Protein backbone atom coordinates (compact mmCIF):
# COMPACT_ATOMS: atom_id res chain seq x y z
CA UNK A 1 0.00 0.00 0.00
CA UNK A 2 1.36 3.44 -0.83
CA UNK A 3 1.72 5.71 2.17
CA UNK A 4 0.21 9.17 2.65
CA UNK A 5 1.68 10.77 5.76
CA UNK A 6 0.36 13.79 7.66
CA UNK A 7 2.73 15.51 10.10
CA UNK A 8 0.95 17.98 12.41
CA UNK A 9 3.21 20.49 14.15
CA UNK A 10 5.77 20.24 11.36
CA UNK A 11 7.53 23.53 12.12
CA UNK A 12 8.76 22.42 15.53
CA UNK A 13 12.06 20.92 16.65
CA UNK A 14 11.09 17.31 15.88
CA UNK A 15 8.74 18.13 12.98
CA UNK A 16 11.34 19.98 10.91
CA UNK A 17 13.69 16.99 11.01
CA UNK A 18 11.05 14.29 10.78
CA UNK A 19 9.38 15.76 7.69
CA UNK A 20 12.74 15.87 5.90
CA UNK A 21 13.50 12.25 6.86
CA UNK A 22 10.02 10.99 5.88
CA UNK A 23 10.13 12.86 2.55
CA UNK A 24 13.44 11.15 1.77
CA UNK A 25 11.90 7.75 2.44
CA UNK A 26 8.35 8.09 1.08
CA UNK A 27 8.73 10.85 -1.53
CA UNK A 28 8.06 14.53 -0.92
CA UNK A 29 4.55 14.50 -2.40
CA UNK A 30 3.44 11.77 0.04
CA UNK A 31 4.36 13.67 3.20
CA UNK A 32 2.04 16.57 4.02
CA UNK A 33 3.53 18.96 6.53
CA UNK A 34 1.06 21.01 8.56
CA UNK A 35 1.32 23.61 11.27
CA UNK A 36 -0.63 26.48 12.79
CA UNK A 37 2.12 28.86 11.57
CA UNK A 38 3.50 29.48 8.09
CA UNK A 39 5.98 26.79 7.07
CA UNK A 40 9.64 27.34 7.87
CA UNK A 41 12.23 27.29 5.06
CA UNK A 42 13.03 23.57 5.22
CA UNK A 43 9.35 22.59 5.10
CA UNK A 44 8.16 25.15 2.53
CA UNK A 45 10.65 24.22 -0.14
CA UNK A 46 10.48 20.48 0.08
CA UNK A 47 6.83 19.43 -0.36
CA UNK A 48 3.13 20.01 0.35
CA UNK A 49 1.96 22.09 3.32
CA UNK A 50 -1.44 22.68 4.96
CA UNK A 51 -2.40 24.99 7.81
CA UNK A 52 -3.72 23.02 10.79
CA UNK A 53 -4.86 24.01 14.25
CA UNK A 54 -5.27 20.92 16.44
CA UNK A 55 -7.98 22.67 18.45
CA UNK A 56 -10.06 23.28 15.31
CA UNK A 57 -11.90 20.01 14.85
CA UNK A 58 -13.57 20.99 11.55
CA UNK A 59 -10.27 22.01 10.02
CA UNK A 60 -8.66 18.72 11.08
CA UNK A 61 -11.61 16.73 9.81
CA UNK A 62 -11.24 18.45 6.45
CA UNK A 63 -7.53 17.53 6.34
CA UNK A 64 -8.21 13.86 7.10
CA UNK A 65 -11.01 13.79 4.54
CA UNK A 66 -8.94 15.49 1.84
CA UNK A 67 -5.72 13.48 2.27
CA UNK A 68 -6.92 10.21 3.84
CA UNK A 69 -3.51 9.76 5.54
CA UNK A 70 -2.27 6.24 6.23
CA UNK A 71 0.06 7.58 8.95
CA UNK A 72 -0.37 10.62 11.19
CA UNK A 73 2.32 12.14 13.40
CA UNK A 74 0.86 14.55 15.97
CA UNK A 75 3.74 16.70 17.19
CA UNK A 76 1.95 19.93 18.17
CA UNK A 77 2.38 20.48 21.92
CA UNK A 78 3.20 23.02 24.61
CA UNK A 79 6.37 21.92 26.44
CA UNK A 80 7.24 21.90 30.13
CA UNK A 81 8.51 25.44 30.82
CA UNK A 82 5.90 27.30 28.75
CA UNK A 83 3.24 24.92 30.10
CA UNK A 84 3.87 26.24 33.61
CA UNK A 85 3.24 29.79 32.37
CA UNK A 86 0.07 28.82 30.50
CA UNK A 87 -1.24 25.76 32.35
CA UNK A 88 -4.83 25.68 31.05
CA UNK A 89 -3.75 26.34 27.51
CA UNK A 90 -1.11 23.58 27.71
CA UNK A 91 -3.65 21.09 29.03
CA UNK A 92 -6.18 22.03 26.37
CA UNK A 93 -3.78 21.90 23.45
CA UNK A 94 -1.96 18.74 24.57
CA UNK A 95 -5.15 16.79 25.40
CA UNK A 96 -7.81 18.05 23.02
CA UNK A 97 -5.42 17.86 20.09
CA UNK A 98 -4.66 14.22 20.84
CA UNK A 99 -8.31 13.25 21.31
CA UNK A 100 -9.23 14.86 17.98
CA UNK A 101 -6.58 12.84 16.18
CA UNK A 102 -7.49 9.57 17.92
CA UNK A 103 -11.17 10.11 17.02
CA UNK A 104 -10.34 10.79 13.38
CA UNK A 105 -8.00 7.80 13.29
CA UNK A 106 -11.05 5.68 14.24
CA UNK A 107 -13.38 7.45 11.78
CA UNK A 108 -10.97 7.37 8.82
CA UNK A 109 -9.35 4.02 9.74
CA UNK A 110 -5.90 5.61 9.75
CA UNK A 111 -3.40 2.75 9.67
CA UNK A 112 -0.90 4.19 12.18
CA UNK A 113 -0.65 7.15 14.55
CA UNK A 114 2.49 8.48 16.27
CA UNK A 115 2.25 10.69 19.33
CA UNK A 116 5.24 11.82 21.40
CA UNK A 117 5.35 11.45 25.14
CA UNK A 118 8.24 12.55 27.35
CA UNK A 119 10.42 11.78 30.37
CA UNK A 120 8.21 14.48 31.96
CA UNK A 121 5.65 11.74 32.75
CA UNK A 122 7.86 10.82 35.71
CA UNK A 123 7.83 12.78 38.95
CA UNK A 124 9.60 13.27 42.27
CA UNK A 125 8.58 9.82 43.59
CA UNK A 126 9.64 7.92 40.47
CA UNK A 127 13.00 6.14 40.78
CA UNK A 128 15.56 8.71 39.60
CA UNK A 129 18.22 6.38 38.20
CA UNK A 130 17.57 3.85 35.45
CA UNK A 131 13.87 4.73 35.72
CA UNK A 132 11.89 1.66 34.66
CA UNK A 133 9.07 1.52 32.13
CA UNK A 134 6.54 0.84 34.89
CA UNK A 135 6.90 2.57 38.26
CA UNK A 136 5.35 5.29 40.45
CA UNK A 137 4.50 8.26 38.21
CA UNK A 138 3.55 11.53 39.87
CA UNK A 139 4.45 14.29 37.38
CA UNK A 140 4.03 17.75 38.85
CA UNK A 141 4.05 19.84 35.66
CA UNK A 142 1.00 20.36 33.47
CA UNK A 143 3.06 19.18 30.51
CA UNK A 144 4.01 16.02 32.43
CA UNK A 145 0.53 15.06 33.49
CA UNK A 146 -0.94 15.94 30.10
CA UNK A 147 1.56 13.49 28.59
CA UNK A 148 0.75 10.84 31.20
CA UNK A 149 -2.99 11.24 30.57
CA UNK A 150 -2.30 11.17 26.83
CA UNK A 151 -0.47 7.88 27.21
CA UNK A 152 -3.50 6.40 28.95
CA UNK A 153 -5.75 7.64 26.10
CA UNK A 154 -3.44 6.11 23.49
CA UNK A 155 -3.54 2.72 25.19
CA UNK A 156 -7.32 3.04 25.63
CA UNK A 157 -7.95 3.79 21.95
CA UNK A 158 -5.72 0.88 21.01
CA UNK A 159 -7.54 -1.55 23.31
CA UNK A 160 -11.09 -0.30 22.70
CA UNK A 161 -11.00 0.75 19.05
CA UNK A 162 -7.92 -0.98 17.65
CA UNK A 163 -6.07 2.23 16.78
CA UNK A 164 -2.45 1.33 15.94
CA UNK A 165 -0.95 4.13 18.00
CA UNK A 166 2.74 4.19 18.86
CA UNK A 167 4.66 6.48 21.15
CA UNK A 168 8.06 7.27 22.64
CA UNK A 169 8.88 9.04 25.90
CA UNK A 170 11.51 11.34 24.42
CA UNK A 171 14.39 12.56 26.56
CA UNK A 172 15.55 16.15 25.92
CA UNK A 173 16.30 16.42 22.20
CA UNK A 174 19.38 18.08 20.74
CA UNK A 175 19.65 19.02 17.08
CA UNK A 176 21.19 21.72 14.90
CA UNK A 177 18.49 22.12 12.22
CA UNK A 178 15.75 23.55 14.47
CA UNK A 179 15.51 25.16 17.89
CA UNK A 180 13.48 23.74 20.75
CA UNK A 181 10.57 25.81 22.02
CA UNK A 182 9.90 26.24 25.70
CA UNK A 183 11.31 23.13 27.37
CA UNK A 184 13.45 22.47 30.44
CA UNK A 185 16.13 20.68 28.43
CA UNK A 186 16.54 23.57 25.94
CA UNK A 187 19.83 24.66 27.54
CA UNK A 188 21.53 21.70 25.85
CA UNK A 189 20.78 23.22 22.43
CA UNK A 190 21.28 26.90 23.30
CA UNK A 191 24.74 26.14 24.71
CA UNK A 192 26.04 25.10 21.26
CA UNK A 193 24.72 28.26 19.57
CA UNK A 194 26.22 30.52 22.23
CA UNK A 195 29.50 28.60 22.37
CA UNK A 196 30.02 29.19 18.65
CA UNK A 197 28.67 32.75 18.56
CA UNK A 198 29.99 34.21 21.84
CA UNK A 199 32.39 31.65 23.34
CA UNK A 200 30.37 31.58 26.57
CA UNK A 201 27.02 30.45 27.95
CA UNK A 202 25.04 31.00 31.14
CA UNK A 203 23.09 27.85 31.95
CA UNK A 204 19.64 28.12 33.54
CA UNK A 205 20.14 24.65 35.08
CA UNK A 206 22.76 24.07 37.76
CA UNK A 207 26.02 22.35 36.90
CA UNK A 208 25.24 18.96 38.49
CA UNK A 209 21.72 18.52 37.05
CA UNK A 210 21.84 15.22 35.16
CA UNK A 211 19.04 14.66 32.63
CA UNK A 212 18.46 12.09 29.88
CA UNK A 213 19.06 13.64 26.44
CA UNK A 214 19.22 12.36 22.88
CA UNK A 215 20.74 13.52 19.63
CA UNK A 216 18.12 14.23 16.98
CA UNK A 217 19.62 11.72 14.52
CA UNK A 218 18.92 8.96 17.05
CA UNK A 219 15.48 10.35 17.93
CA UNK A 220 14.33 10.42 14.30
CA UNK A 221 15.74 6.95 13.66
CA UNK A 222 13.95 5.65 16.78
CA UNK A 223 10.66 7.22 15.69
CA UNK A 224 10.78 5.77 12.19
CA UNK A 225 11.96 2.34 13.47
CA UNK A 226 9.06 2.20 15.90
CA UNK A 227 6.59 3.16 13.17
CA UNK A 228 8.09 0.55 10.80
CA UNK A 229 8.03 -2.29 13.33
CA UNK A 230 5.42 -5.02 12.77
CA UNK A 231 2.37 -4.36 14.97
CA UNK A 232 2.75 -7.66 16.81
CA UNK A 233 6.18 -6.56 18.09
CA UNK A 234 4.73 -3.50 19.81
CA UNK A 235 3.94 -4.64 23.34
CA UNK A 236 3.54 -1.11 24.77
CA UNK A 237 0.69 1.08 23.56
CA UNK A 238 1.11 3.81 26.16
CA UNK A 239 4.66 4.97 25.39
CA UNK A 240 8.16 3.47 25.30
CA UNK A 241 10.97 4.61 27.59
CA UNK A 242 13.99 5.76 25.55
CA UNK A 243 17.23 6.39 27.43
CA UNK A 244 19.51 8.47 25.24
CA UNK A 245 22.61 9.86 26.97
CA UNK A 246 22.54 11.24 30.50
CA UNK A 247 24.80 14.18 31.31
CA UNK A 248 24.97 17.35 33.39
CA UNK A 249 25.48 20.93 32.11
CA UNK A 250 29.03 20.76 33.48
CA UNK A 251 29.80 17.54 31.59
CA UNK A 252 28.42 19.03 28.38
CA UNK A 253 30.48 22.20 28.87
CA UNK A 254 33.61 20.11 29.39
CA UNK A 255 32.91 18.18 26.20
CA UNK A 256 32.49 21.44 24.26
CA UNK A 257 35.78 22.72 25.72
CA UNK A 258 37.59 19.82 24.03
CA UNK A 259 36.75 21.53 20.71
CA UNK A 260 36.58 25.17 21.89
CA UNK A 261 39.17 25.43 24.71
CA UNK A 262 38.27 29.06 25.52
CA UNK A 263 34.57 28.31 26.06
CA UNK A 264 33.30 29.70 29.39
CA UNK A 265 30.31 28.30 31.26
CA UNK A 266 28.46 30.04 34.09
CA UNK A 267 25.21 29.35 35.91
CA UNK A 268 22.24 31.56 36.86
CA UNK A 269 21.45 31.91 40.58
CA UNK A 270 17.95 30.55 40.23
CA UNK A 271 15.47 29.62 37.54
CA UNK A 272 12.00 28.02 37.74
CA UNK A 273 13.09 25.30 35.30
CA UNK A 274 15.48 23.89 37.93
CA UNK A 275 12.59 22.51 40.00
CA UNK A 276 11.16 20.83 36.89
CA UNK A 277 14.53 19.26 36.04
CA UNK A 278 14.94 18.07 39.65
CA UNK A 279 11.62 16.21 39.46
CA UNK A 280 12.66 14.24 36.35
CA UNK A 281 14.75 11.06 36.04
CA UNK A 282 18.50 11.28 35.71
CA UNK A 283 18.71 8.15 33.58
CA UNK A 284 16.22 5.81 31.95
CA UNK A 285 15.87 2.05 31.44
CA UNK A 286 14.83 1.48 27.82
CA UNK A 287 15.33 -2.29 27.66
CA UNK A 288 11.75 -2.88 26.43
CA UNK A 289 12.47 -0.85 23.28
CA UNK A 290 15.59 -2.97 22.59
CA UNK A 291 13.59 -6.16 23.06
CA UNK A 292 10.48 -5.19 21.09
CA UNK A 293 11.84 -3.32 18.08
CA UNK A 294 15.61 -3.70 18.29
CA UNK A 295 16.38 -0.16 19.47
CA UNK A 296 20.06 0.82 19.78
CA UNK A 297 21.53 4.26 20.34
CA UNK A 298 24.36 5.50 18.06
CA UNK A 299 25.39 8.89 19.45
CA UNK A 300 27.19 9.21 22.78
CA UNK A 301 28.11 12.57 24.33
CA UNK A 302 31.40 12.88 22.43
CA UNK A 303 29.99 11.98 19.02
CA UNK A 304 26.95 14.19 19.46
CA UNK A 305 29.01 17.21 20.57
CA UNK A 306 31.37 16.89 17.61
CA UNK A 307 28.50 16.50 15.12
CA UNK A 308 26.53 19.44 16.59
CA UNK A 309 29.52 21.78 16.42
CA UNK A 310 30.52 20.71 12.90
CA UNK A 311 27.02 21.21 11.48
CA UNK A 312 26.08 24.31 13.42
CA UNK A 313 29.31 26.02 12.33
CA UNK A 314 28.12 25.78 8.71
CA UNK A 315 24.70 27.33 9.31
CA UNK A 316 25.31 30.04 11.94
C1 LIG B 1 10.97 19.65 27.77
O1 LIG B 1 12.05 20.00 28.28
O2 LIG B 1 9.88 20.09 28.13
C2 LIG B 1 11.02 18.64 26.66
C3 LIG B 1 10.81 17.25 27.16
C4 LIG B 1 11.87 16.59 27.95
O3 LIG B 1 9.81 16.66 26.92
N1 LIG B 1 12.25 18.74 25.95
Image: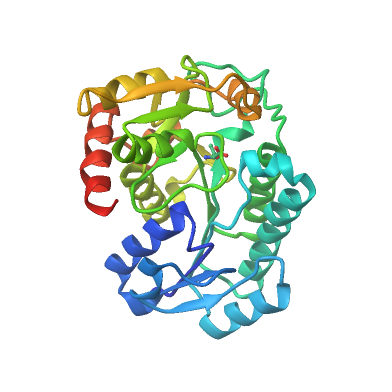
Residue at the spot x=32%, y=60% of the render?
21
Residue at the spot x=42%, y=55% of the render?
227
Depth check: 304 or 293 in front? 304
Q: Position of residue 185 (x, y in %)?
A: 50, 34
Q: Quadrant of ligand 1?
A: top right
Q: Position of residue 285 (x, y in %)?
A: 46, 25
Residue at the spot x=47%, y=77% of the render?
49
Q: Position of residue 310 (x, y in %)?
A: 20, 42
Q: Is residue 268 left or right of residue 230?
A: right
- In the displayed structure, 103 sits above or below 259; it is below
Say if residue 68 shows up in the picture: yes
Q: Is residue 264 left or right of residue 203?
A: left
- In the displayed structure, 248 sits above or below 108; it is above
- In the displayed structure, 222 sits above or below 50; it is above
Q: Is residue 76 left or right of residue 57?
A: left
- In the displayed structure, 186 sits above or below 3; it is above
**Residue sticking out furthest to the bottom:** 66
Q: Position of residue 85 (x, y in %)?
A: 72, 42
Amino acid sequence: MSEKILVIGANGQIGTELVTALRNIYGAENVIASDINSPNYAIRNSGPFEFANVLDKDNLHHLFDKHRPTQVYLLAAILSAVGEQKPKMAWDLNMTGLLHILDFAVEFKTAKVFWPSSIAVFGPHSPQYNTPQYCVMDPNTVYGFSKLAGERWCEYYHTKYGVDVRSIRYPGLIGWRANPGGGTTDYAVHIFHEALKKGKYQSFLQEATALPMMYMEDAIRATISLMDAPAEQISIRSSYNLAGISFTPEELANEIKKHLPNFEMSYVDSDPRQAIADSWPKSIDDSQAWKDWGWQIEYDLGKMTWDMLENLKKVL
